[in-house]
Image (cartoon, grey):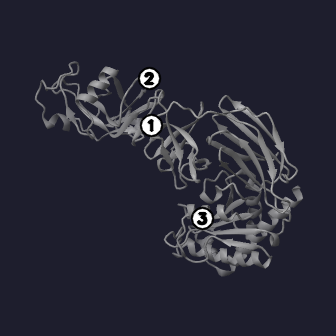
Amino acid sequence: MKFFLSLLFSCLFGQLAVAQTVPAKSTPVTKPTKPITPAAVDSLQVEYVRTQPDAELWLQPGDRLQVRVKARTGLKVSLWNQHPLQELPAAQNKGQAGLYVGNYVIQPGDKLANLNVPVLVDDTTDVYPYTVFSTSSKVTLLNPAQALYGFTQSKNAYMNYGLGEDRLGGAKMGFLDSLVRVQINGKVGRDYRIRLSNTLNAYIPVQQVRLEATPSTYTGESLTSSWSVSGDSARGKYDYVRVAVGQRLPYTSYMDVDPARIIVDIYGAVSNTNWMTLHRTLREVKNVQYQQIASDVYRVIIDLKHPQAWGYSVGYQGTSLVVKVKRQPPKLKLKHLTIAIDAGHGGTSTGATGKTGIPEKDITLKISLLLQKELQKKGATVLMTRTTDSTFDTSERVRMLKKTLPDLLVSIHVNSAGRPEVKGTSTYYRHLAFRPLSQALYEEVLKLDLKEFGNIGGFNFALNAPTEFPNALVETAFASNPEDEQRLINPQFQEDMAKQIRKGVERFLKETRKRK
Ligand SMILES: [Zn+2]
């Protein structure tokens, strides 16, 4: 293997994907033994030679380098002249012949630095020698003995489970504080793959990580120490769980229900926690404990006093991990609370449009302004993400909300579907602990005699992502359905919708009071 790699890469490659014709397969010489004519290349009908995914790749031993070639049917195609690619039966490729696929498992000792990988294509006639193409994107092989580390650059560095993409972006695993040291064990295009534990990786955008200048043998694994668990003064809004970790290690977290809990997993931490001090100032944190759930995963478990969680955030103070736990507001009435309303879209983001051409951004703003009045009438303090037709990026909205920290957030949108017959109302949540808010909203909005589209969970929408406060998205109705649209643009319906959303929030508060 190494022979071929060094031979091919040092002698022939290092250029971008260019078809090159080389001499007979067995002898590593540089002069062609037969004349090369363009016809040889043309007759192969090579459309593309790609890695899968077709992006810059950093791989380590054990990873698979997958390659796809589209060319004429019946050829002999191989990766590095050693690993044959198989032509898929046409039936497995939408009836098209000539798709060759294969992969190579990276072995320890394989070396490759930012190069296009050679793929050999042979027409099997022996009239022409084989022709070498190279993948359109470059591949680098990492040496695990010299691990790469980096630091997160901002407080909003997010991790994804995988590389999936749709209109909502990849499924998010969670956010990291700044200056968290992460081990990079791969790269796919614009994302680094980072190692969380022996069994768990995550993906993080390249621009969110600053690489350490040189590879390091310093792993950053760390022993935890004692905890301090305390709260604000009686009138304050938060309790704090402080865990001395020794370094800013990566973590993931979530809220569990029944019982209401906050779980934080710290990767690379090993327990040396010999005590935890709980102070009398605590109002929301009932109990704390930890589990070493794997040799490299330390789990922080925080039991809450109330069945309804009001949110939390995780970050570092120095090298102590701090879980800031929002206390349930003592008075669950609108007049004691700050409610945030997010009018979907705005400015250049017009959102959905139906037959009438009235954009979603106008409808969401009207309903939001009416809802603002509804809530203010009941004495609530209302926070609006926008009150005019202005452009306001969703990530900017999230940043603003994480700064202002309302007690609760409702985001308002208008739905759209490819099929015009699809109609109805729906509400959405991302975190299970916040489902009750979305359910209460759903119950009240349905009273407008809209069709049930559903209460939808795990929704990977930016404004459902914050863990700091209960939040829900209301997709009022479908702009793409003529009947729904007629209602959406009707001022009376907009007023009714605002009223029902206000009632939904009140219903959530009432039900939460009862759950105490
Ligand atoms: Zn929308």
Q: Amino acid at mark 1?
A: Thr
| Disc 1 to disc 3: CB gap under 8 Å | no
Q: Residue at x 69, y 60 (%)?
A: 472
Of the numbered discs in the image, which one, if any, rests on residue 214?
Answer: 1
Using the rendered view, name the quadrant where residue 28 is placed: top left
> Where's the C terminus, which quadrant?
bottom right
Q: Earlier in the sequence, mark 1 or mark 3?
A: 1
Q: Amino acid at mark 2?
A: Pro
| Disc 3 to disc 2: CB gap under 8 Å | no
Residue 241, given in percent of the width and then of the height, sits at 76, 47
Q: Which residue is mark 2?
A: 108
Is residue 499 or residue 176 the one in the foreground?
Answer: 176
Work out whether residue 75 can be spotted. Answer: no
Secondary structure, mark 3, is helix
Q: Alpha-carbon neighbours of circle 2 within 10 Å: few (<14), some, or many (≥20)? A: some
Q: Earlier in the sequence, mark 2 or mark 1?
A: 2
Secondary structure, mark 2, is loop
Work out whether 269 lies above or below 171: above
Q: Earlier in the sequence, mark 3 or mark 2?
A: 2
Secondary structure, mark 1, is loop
Work out whether residue 366 can be spotted. Answer: yes
- Determine the CA span between mark 2 and mark 1: 20 Å
Q: Could you tell whether 158 is left or right of 337 in the image?
A: left
Is residue 487 or residue 78 the one in the foreground?
Answer: 78
Work out whether 10 lies above or below 249: above
Residue 119, given in percent of the width and then of the height, sits at 30, 31
Q: Which residue is mark 3?
A: 397
> Where's the N terminus, which quadrant?
top left
